[in-house]
Amino acid sequence: MSVPANLYAGLNDIVDVLEEFPVESSRYLTLLHEIDAKCVHSTPQLNKEIDRFISKSNVSNASQNLANINQLFQELMPSLEEKMHVSSIMLESLQHLTSRLELDYEIAIKNQEIPSKLRVGVDNHPAMHLHYELMSKIDAKNHHAQGANNGGNGNGSRSSQALKSESRREAMVANKKPLPIQDTPLMATTPDEDFKDDPNTKKRANIALPPRNVGPPDKKRKRRANVSTVAIPSTSPPVSSVDPGNPKINEFGEPLYCYCNQVAYGEMVGCDGASCELEWFHLPCIHLDHLPKGKWYCDDCKRKKS
């Protein structure tokens, strides 16, 4: 059975327009090349006369050079005007084809000539699956946090932010193979007395950090956060581990850190300043390849100390 010719009117005309684009362009470009061929001798001669006039090597011939330049301009002017005319016609033709292409696309969408799976993609794409799974986790844990807040514990808002952050990080590491880690996570504690006395350090002392090879026990250990390689436990972290003094959060309720105003990811270093506003910094943002040894202060805290 034959298919009617106007069954896909929009798509058929789109194909016709795409075939006309190179034909129209080639036609006008050929005309422009023919016009350039007329000036193949006059243009180099004009450039030479201009260079002689600018060099001022022979002042007595300056008037003669100007006369030659004027004569060459008169010879080239018709060709230049013709090129401008052809270029304007070429522009109008291509604009007309572009308008036809846009109109045909609207017709194809209106007549549903393009299936939705080809236009917007399939529903079971991994990116969409992770997105909806993430949103469902956030909604479920948000309702749970609101119920806990209504119970009168007064910490519902902070727990909600922590749960949202945890859910997004679980989705980030869902498709990545985690590195083998020890059964007992290394806690962000250090035997150094100066590191213990820092109130900014005590505020984050309960955050579980990934184990790593460290040097001798008497060396200072630098705080770090590695989101991309460590599987975060599904249980909610204690409320005390969430920093209540950081007012910057994104639309998902996650706290923002660093100069880039982004969430925590990769390797991060904590500022040892007592009143640091940003607190945590991504290593690439501070132009570091490795975690610094000993205490480290951000630029703002360095200016405050000085």
Image (cartoon, rainbow, N blue to C red):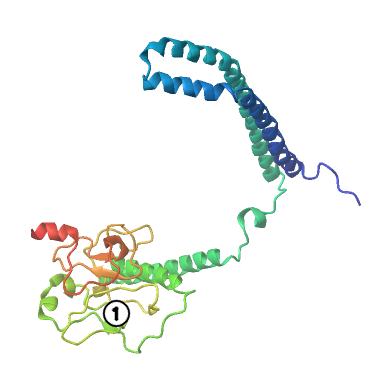
Q: Using the rendered image of the protein, determine whether residue 93 is visible from the camera's viewpoint.
A: no
Residue pointed to by mark 1: 208
Q: Horizontally, is 126 left or right of 222 in the view?
A: right
- Which of the two residues, 207 or 300, is positioned nearer the viewer here? 300
Residue 286 percent across, percent down from the top left: 26, 62
Q: Using the rendered image of the protein, determine whether residue 5 is visible from the camera's viewpoint.
A: yes
Q: Residue at x 62, y 58 (%)?
A: 121
Q: Helix or strand or loop: what does disc 1 sit on? A: strand
Vertical relation: 29 (above or below) 303? above
- Which of the two residues, 144 or 186, is positioned nearer the viewer here? 186
What amino acid does circle 1 point to?
Answer: Ala
Q: Horizontally, is 278 left or right of 198 in the view?
A: right
Q: Horizontally, is 99 left or right of 243 in the view?
A: right
- Which of the two residues, 39 or 54, is positioned nearer the viewer here? 54
Q: Residue at x 19, y 87 (%)?
A: 217
Graded by Cα atoms within 10 Å as few (under 14), some (14 to 19) or many (20 or more), the crowding at tag 1 reads: some
Vertical relation: 291 (above or below) 52? below
Residue 234 percent across, percent down from the top left: 40, 78
For residue 124, what is the image quadrant? bottom right
Q: Residue at x 47, y 67 (%)?
A: 134
Residue 39 percent across, percent down from the top left: 60, 23
